[in-house]
Image (spheres, helix red, strand yellow):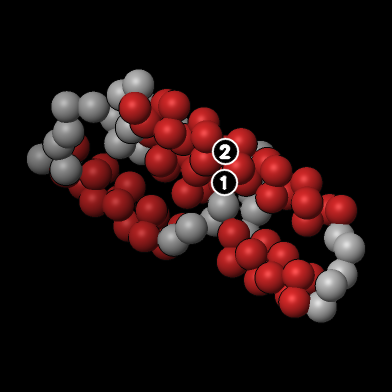
Amino acid sequence: MKTDRELLAPDHTGMKVDYLGLLNQVRSALEHGSKEPGFAELVRQFTHHFQELGQRWYAGDLTVVDELLQLYCVEPEARKALKAAMKAQEGK
């Protein structure tokens, strides 16, 4: 796959957050009236990451989308497949 700009960010090696798990736990806590300060902090970070996504995306940084998807463990197998396809295309 040929692009004029970088599409994938470097592989994320730090801590990751499973977005489905986070949102399900927060939803459950809200439904049951639980006080979960840890969830509040994760949601605060989540909102910051989305603000950064918008700022960097509109500044022309396409890799920010991949960074966010990696950080929140969104479709890791699809990313692996895309990386493999891009690598195979480079070899042609």
Question: Label 2 belongs to which residue?
Answer: 49
- The answer to whether residue 65 is visible is yes
Residue 54 located left or right of residue 48: left
Screen quadrant of the N terminus: top left
Question: Label 1 belongs to which residue?
Answer: 71
Q: Amino acid at mark 2?
A: His
Residue sitting at 36 percent across and 60 percent down? 78
Mark seen at residue 19? none
State whether residue 43 is above or below residue 33: above
State whether residue 11 is above or below residue 81: above
Proximity of marks 2 and 1: CB atoms separated by less than 8 Å: yes
Q: In x, y percent, where is residue 63?
A: 38, 33
Using the image as rendered, state which of residue 22 and residue 18 is in the foreground. Answer: 22
Residue 27 located left or right of residue 54: right
Q: In x, y percent, where is residue 64?
A: 43, 34
Q: In x, y percent, where is residue 25?
A: 72, 69
Q: Separation of disc 2 and disc 1 at Cα?
A: 10 Å
Q: Residue furthest top?
A: 59
Screen quadrant of the C terminus: top left
Q: Residue furthest left?
A: 92
